[in-house]
C-alpha cells in the first residue's frame, strides 16, 4: 500500500473517490457532505490531500481545507474503498493528513465534524477533543459545505449550534 501526498497526476482517481464518498453515505445512512470530482481535483493540485494507492488503484483518501485565513484547518472526505475497509487504513490516512496539516499550517487549530464512531476514536487518539460548534471556524463557506448532508436542516434550525455530528478540535497551543 502506498500512502502519498496527492498531486495533479492523481486526478484520474477523483471520480472514483467522489463516487465512493457518495455510496458510503447511502450505505451507512449517515450524513456526509458530497464532493464533486472537480472539488477533489483542486485539493490534489494544491497538495492538500493524501491518497492511498494499491497497484495504482484508489484505496483511500482524505483532504485538507483551510478556513479563517489559515487559523483553522479541517480534514474532510476521509474515505476507504470497500475492499480495503477494516484493515486500519483510515487511521493511517488520517495520521498522514494530520501530520501534513501540522507541517503546512503549524499554528492552525485542526478540526473535524463527524457522525462516525471510528473517526471519533481516531481523532481522539491524535489529540482532538470534542467541542461545541462555537469553538470551530465561523467561516460561512465551511458551513455551506454541509448543505449536501441529509442532516443540514438540524444545523440550520439550531443556527449552527448543534447537529448530529460531533465537533472535534486539536489545538496546537494546548
Image (cartoon, rainbow, N blue to C red):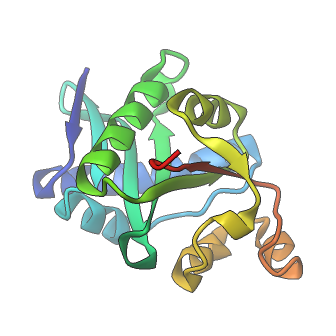
Instruction: Examine the image and state in which quarter residue 129 appears.
Output: top right
- Outermost residue toward the top in this view: 87
Instruction: Examine the image and state in which quarter residue 56 appears.
Output: top left
Q: Is residue 88 left or right of residue 169?
A: left
Find residue 91 and report its horizontal and vertical position in percent: 47, 27
From the viewer's perspective, is residue 64 above or below residue 152? above
Find residue 22 and report its horizontal and vertical position in percent: 56, 54
Going 61% across and 78% down the picture, which residue do you hit?
Answer: 138
- Outermost residue toward the front in this view: 174
Residue in front for this viewpoint, 24 or 71: 71
Q: Quadrant of the N terminus?
A: top left
Going 48% across and 44% down the picture, which residue do you hit?
Answer: 78
Find residue 27 and report its horizontal and vertical position in percent: 69, 42
Q: Total marks drawn?
A: 0
Going 32% across and 70% down the picture, which residue do you hit?
Answer: 38
From the viewer's perspective, is residue 108 above or below residue 92? below
Residue in front for this viewpoint, 137 or 78: 137
Residue in front for this viewpoint, 115 or 169: 169
Amino acid at each position: 500500500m502506498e500512502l502519498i501526498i496527492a498531486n495533479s497526476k492523481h486526478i484520474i482517481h477523483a471520480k472514483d473517490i467522489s463516487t465512493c464518498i457518495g455510496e458510503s453515505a447511502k450505505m451507512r445512512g449517515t450524513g456526509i457532505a458530497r464532493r464533486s470530482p472537480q472539488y477533489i481535483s483542486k485539493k490534489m493540485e494544491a497538495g492538500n490531500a493524501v491518497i492511498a494507492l494499491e497497484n495504482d488503484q484508489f484505496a483511500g483518501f482524505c483532504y485538507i481545507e483551510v478556513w479563517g485565513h489559515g487559523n483553522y484547518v479541517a480534514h474532510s472526505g476521509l474515505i476507504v474503498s470497500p475492499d480495503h475497509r477494516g484493515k486500519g487504513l483510515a487511521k493511517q490516512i488520517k495520521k498522514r493528513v494530520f501530520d501534513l496539516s501540522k507541517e503546512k499550517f503549524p499554528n492552525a487549530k485542526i478540526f473535524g465534524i463527524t457522525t462516525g464512531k471510528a473517526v471519533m476514536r481516531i481523532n481522539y487518539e491524535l489529540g482532538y477533543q470534542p467541542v461545541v460548534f462555537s469553538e470551530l471556524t465561523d467561516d460561512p463557506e465551511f458551513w455551506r459545505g454541509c448543505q449536501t448532508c441529509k442532516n443540514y436542516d438540524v444545523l440550520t434550525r439550531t443556527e449552527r449550534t448543534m447537529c448530529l455530528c460531533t465537533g472535534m478540535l486539536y489545538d496546537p497551543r494546548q
